[in-house]
Image (tube, rainbow, N blue to C red):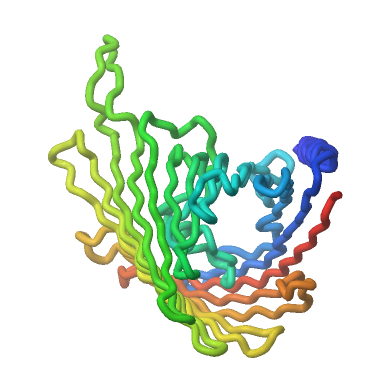
């Protein structure tokens, strides 16, 4: 595996050096995690939780690409590391008469909720990712652009629906459809929403005789995300509501299952080096059942040791303490401490 990773990186670097301009970027997350439940240690580990190798080639003024390899420590892997393809897409600009309209094709971002703009201010994942509403990237094609006068943004996309962790393993004959928008009516206030239709399993499957019959495992999802962002001085607040309704249309006696998430995340920037963050999630996997949900309380801080010429974080330390409390009082809360060193470097290949 390690030889394969080095080989892929070498070939890509040589290929991209032949283009007009390519940006190479690397990001690594070294993390210590300590977790207890009912006073008993469940986890105490140091690991490379994420490593990103990114290439951003530019083909003239109107075409730009992105290629990402995602690798991380995994004890179950033969070599102790796993690798996945995270991004592989091209952006085409100025193809249409509409100003700033962009076409994206390939393994691209999923524009649902805040997962596509999540920059890990907390070590914890974006709510859509953590509670398994969508995969952060998927194979598809989409259009995106800006409303006039900087009023906001919009996206519309069609996806395979399998995400990026599997390829050809969880496909069916239906595509997933998504629309997303953000508007900024006044400085410091942004709100918007996402709507997505997706499916799992084909609607019909062959029986033992080859006759096509209704698939009882067919699942259909309708999901919505409402997002609000508020900023005042050094303080910011991100509010998010997620809702997903799952149905099995070929089973008439099967009731729909609706799951929801409410997430609040305030941040406060003390200075250019230090900021504080908190987060509170309420997760309900089935609103029709009691005592099956949980809440997450997170307190954290980010210390930026070094920034680049554009004032973006280059080397920083993150510390999070979180308590995950089950709604069922018979279950014990889970306490987790995470300390993470993130470092980023990039270089342009001419």
Q: What's the residue at 35%, 67% (across, down)?
A: 241
Query: Above or below — where is 27 with respect to 137?
Result: below
Observer-nearest of 241 and 77: 241
Res. 84 visible in picture: yes
x, y (%) of residue 87? 62, 46
**Left or right relative to 313: residue 231:** left
Res. 325 visible in picture: no
Observer-nearest of 299 and 66: 66
Question: Residue 20 appears in which quarter of the rendering?
Answer: top right
Instruction: Count every numbered label the image shows and give the total.
Output: 0
Residue located farthest toward the front when viewing the structure as drawn? 97
Observer-nearest of 334 and 208: 208
Query: Above or below — where is 208 with respect to 224?
Result: above
x, y (%) of residue 252? 14, 38
Q: What's the residue at 40%, 57% (across, down)?
A: 180
User: Which quadrant is home to the N terminus?
Assistant: top right
Q: What's the residue at 76%, 55% (across, down)?
A: 25
Question: Residue 293 appears in which quarter of the rendering?
Answer: bottom left
x, y (%) of residue 283? 35, 66
Residue located farthest toward the left when viewing the structure as drawn? 253
**Left or right relative to 10: residue 337:** left
**Left or right relative to 173: residue 45:** right
Query: Above or below — where is 123 with respect to 237?
Result: above
Observer-nearest of 234 and 133: 234
Query: Above or below — where is 1 with respect to 272?
Result: above
x, y (%) of residue 227? 39, 69
Q: What's the residue at 58%, 48% (across, down)?
A: 94
């Amino acid at each position: 595996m390690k030889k394969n990773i080095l080989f892929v990186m070498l070939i890509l670097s040589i290929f991209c050096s032949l283009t007009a301009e390519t940006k190479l970027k690397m990001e690594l997350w070294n993390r210590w995690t300590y977790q207890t439940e009912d006073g008993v240690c469940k986890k105490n580990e140091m690991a490379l939780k994420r490593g990103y190798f990114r290439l951003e080639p530019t083909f003239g003024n109107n075409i730009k690409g992105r290629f990402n390899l995602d690798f991380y420590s995994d004890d179950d892997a033969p070599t102790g590391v796993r690798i996945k393809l995270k991004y592989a897409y091209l952006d085409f600009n100025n193809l249409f008469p509409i100003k700033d309209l962009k076409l994206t094709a390939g393994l691209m971002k999923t524009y649902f909720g805040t997962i596509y703009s999540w920059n890990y201010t907390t070590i914890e994942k974006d709510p859509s990712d953590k509670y398994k509403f969508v995969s952060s990237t998927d194979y598809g094609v989409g259009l995106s652009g800006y409303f006039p006068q900087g009023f906001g943004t919009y996206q519309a996309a069609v996806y395979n629906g399998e995400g990026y962790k599997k390829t050809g393993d969880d496909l069916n004959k239906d595509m997933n459809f998504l629309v997303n928008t953000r508007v900024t009516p006044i400085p410091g206030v942004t709100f918007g929403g996402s709507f997505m239709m997706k499916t799992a399993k084909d609607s019909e499957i062959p029986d033992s005789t080859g006759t096509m019959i209704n698939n009882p495992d067919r699942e259909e999802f309708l999901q919505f995300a409402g997002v609000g962002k508020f900023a005042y001085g050094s303080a910011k607040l991100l509010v998010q509501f997620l809702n997903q309704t799952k149905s099995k249309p070929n089973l008439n006696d099967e009731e729909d299952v609706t799951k929801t998430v409410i997430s609040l995340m305030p941040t406060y920037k003390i200075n250019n080096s230090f900021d504080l963050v908190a987060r509170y999630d309420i997760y309900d996997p089935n609103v029709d059942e009691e005592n099956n949900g949980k809440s997450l309380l997170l307190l954290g801080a980010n210390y930026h040791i070094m920034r680049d010429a554009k004032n973006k974080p280059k080397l920083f330390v993150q510390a999070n303490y979180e308590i995950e409390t089950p709604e069922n009082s018979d279950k014990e809360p889970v306490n987790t401490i995470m300390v993470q060193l993130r470092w980023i470097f990039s270089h342009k290949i001419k």
